[in-house]
Amino acid sequence: MVCDAWTEKLDAYVDGELPAGESRALAEHLRGCAPCAAASLSKVQQKLAVRAAGQRFKADPAFRARIQKSIARKPAPWTRFWFPVLATAAVLIIAGAIFLNINRGRSRDLQLMSELADLHVATLASSNPVDVVSTDRHTVKPWFAGKIPFTFNLPELQDSPFTLLGGKVSYLKQSPGAELIFRVRQHQISVFIFQEQAFQEQAWGNTHPDDAVRTALSFNVRSWSHNGLRYFVIGDASPQDLDKLSELIKAAG
């Protein structure tokens, strides 16, 4: 049975609505409670399934053409009197479209961060969070050969507060990539690496996302591109810890 103390908070946790302190406490609880971890994983999987179902239907060009043809009308004589009003409305619509396009790009970024947070939570909640278990980068990196269509370098962690726990193959936007798990004190951090081409529709450049997108489901996030690969670092560790780990990975790359 799922622990009564956390039952009412699981939905808020996977939706990113818990305060940061409670989110960290629940994440710590999930690491040691199999029933709660299983319940959390089930909720994340349900959320991913609903999101995937909502993206299945896309109107084809033929359907769009039929709609445009059905609403086409010959201009009536009275339209010349309304032309100034319509012109003004058109300007407002164009301005609104530009605004919506800017915000649509930011919305895609937020959705991407939410999907990464879901993957991170699913890993934390899993009884087998990694497929290759090793603290040796020379063991973890070769394990991915033949499993993903690219290679990457792992940092030397000696004299750093970070420990490599292992890795596994993850999928985002239907593209395979590497998920590496690092530990710093009592916190676990996921490092995702995917091919840059999988994110061509995203609005980000080669810098960190803006402050509003630097957190997802109460997790801190860092992202950058290098040599055709997109890196994401996500976890409930402090922003300073994520910055340090990001710099180590960048130096290795």
Image (spheres, rainbow, N blue to C red):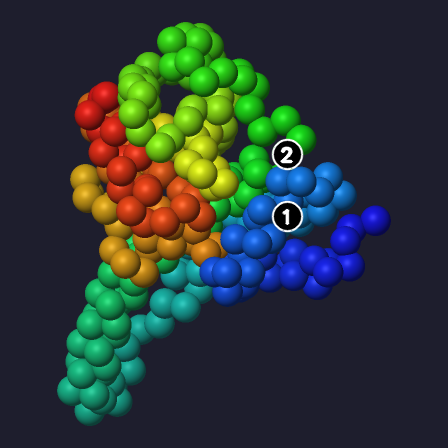
Q: Secondary structure at mark 2?
A: loop
Whether residue 221 can be seen here: yes
Say which of 172 and 231 sits in front.
231
Q: Residue drawn at (22%, 65%), measured in percent from left and top?
A: 98
Q: Is residue 1 left or right of residue 100?
A: right
Q: Is residue 249 left or right of residue 121?
A: left
Q: Residue drawn at (56%, 35%), measured in percent from left and top?
A: 123
Residue 173 position within the rendered picture, expressed as x and y whole percent measured from the top left = 44, 36
Whether residue 200 can be seen here: no
**As drawn, 89 above or below 51:** below
Q: Is residue 55 left or right of residue 152?
A: right
**Rendering quarter of residue 155:** top left
Residue 20 position within the rendered picture, expressed as x and y whole percent measured from the top left = 47, 60
Say which of 64 and 70 sits in front.
64
Q: Is residue 140 left or right of residue 91?
A: right
Q: Identify residue type, mark 1.
A: His
Residue furthest front as drawn:
159
Mark 2 lies on residue: 126
Say which of 194 and 23 sits in front.
23
| Mark 1 nearby-residue class (10 Å; few <14, some 14–19, many ≥20) | some
| Mark 2 nearby-residue class (10 Å; few <14, some 14–19, many ≥20) | some
- Mark 1 → mark 2, Cα distance in angstroms: 13 Å
Q: Earlier in the sequence, mark 1 or mark 2?
A: 1
The image quadrant where one finds the C terminus is top left
Residue 192 position within the rendered picture, expressed as x and y whole percent measured from the top left = 40, 32
- The label on residue 7 is none
Q: Secondary structure at mark 1?
A: helix
Mark 1 lies on residue: 29
Marks 1 and 2 in Cβ contact (< 8 Å): no
Q: Identify residue type, mark 2.
A: Ser
Q: Residue drawn at (45%, 18%), measured in percent from left and top?
A: 135
